[in-house]
Amino acid sequence: MRPATEALIVIDVQNDFCPGGALAVEGGDRIVDPINALMGDFQVRVLTQDWHPAGHSSFASQHPGHDAFGEIEMPYGPQVLWPDHCVQGSNGAAFHPGLNTDPADLIIRKGFRAAIDSYSAFFENDHTTPTGLEGYLRTRGVTALTLVGLATDFCVNFSAVDAAKLGFDVTVREDLCRAIDLNGSLAAARDGMRAAGVALEA
């Protein structure tokens, strides 16, 4: 059992990011059982859940003339446009049915503000609006994080880099993540995580 100063952060293991979902990550369902097994090693366990209102500004459907996976400029910076996914209350937004959610101490929802996307478990995509996760972990006395989940190059990456910038000791278990890899995004994410001081474990 890991000490109580270490937390497991399980990022967005939801139906829409698994095979058959609206924004499926190849092999996304294959990490579910090993994540369940890993939960038993941690005393502090947090799950994150992408939780968009219908018509979210990051959806390509809200931008006529723009296709999914293209990029536009938003007030907070560049934004990839996504297929409609993880809409609040939908089956796609639900956790993968095989994921054991019972051990979670906290489930934190993100992306619920219609005008701004939120990849990171710690901040909205403006990099300043907090989700509250940092405060929760600090009050629990957590200093080290292990991140797993979906997708390596977006929500896991942003969460890991933000956590490192906040002073946490961060490890990403790449074997328990899967990537979208959009136009080289996986290689860029790995470089960025390493540069931020994140440890990548296979």
Image (cartoon, rainbow, N blue to C red):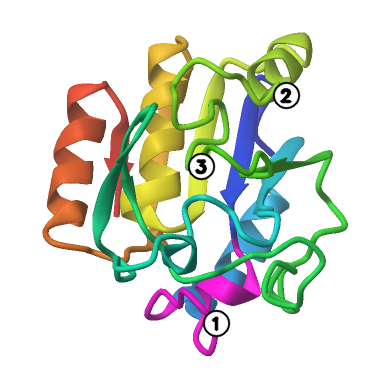
Residue furthest right as drawn: 102
> What segment is highlighted magenta in the picture?
13-27
As shown in the figure, which amino acid type bears the numbered disc 3?
A: Asp
Is residue 33 at least partly visible in the picture? no
Q: What mark, if any, has residue 4 been given in the picture?
A: 2
Q: Residue at x 75, y 78 (%)?
A: 91
- Give the CA distance from mark 1 to mark 2: 35 Å
Residue 179, relative to residue 2: is it above or below? Answer: below
Q: Earlier in the sequence, mark 3 or mark 1?
A: 1
Q: Residue at x 39, y 36 (%)?
A: 158
Q: Quadrant of the N terminus?
A: top right
Please tell me whether mark 3 or mark 2 is closer to you in this view: 3
Q: Is residue 31 left or right of residue 96?
A: left
Who is closer to the viewer here, 27 or 65?
65
Q: What mark, if any, has residue 21 been given in the picture?
A: 1
The percent coordinates of residue 152 (x first, y second) are: 36, 54
Q: Is residue 108 left or right of residue 2?
A: right
The percent coordinates of residue 178 (x first, y second) are: 38, 65
Is residue 76 at least partly visible in the picture? yes
- Give the CA distance from mark 3 to mark 1: 19 Å
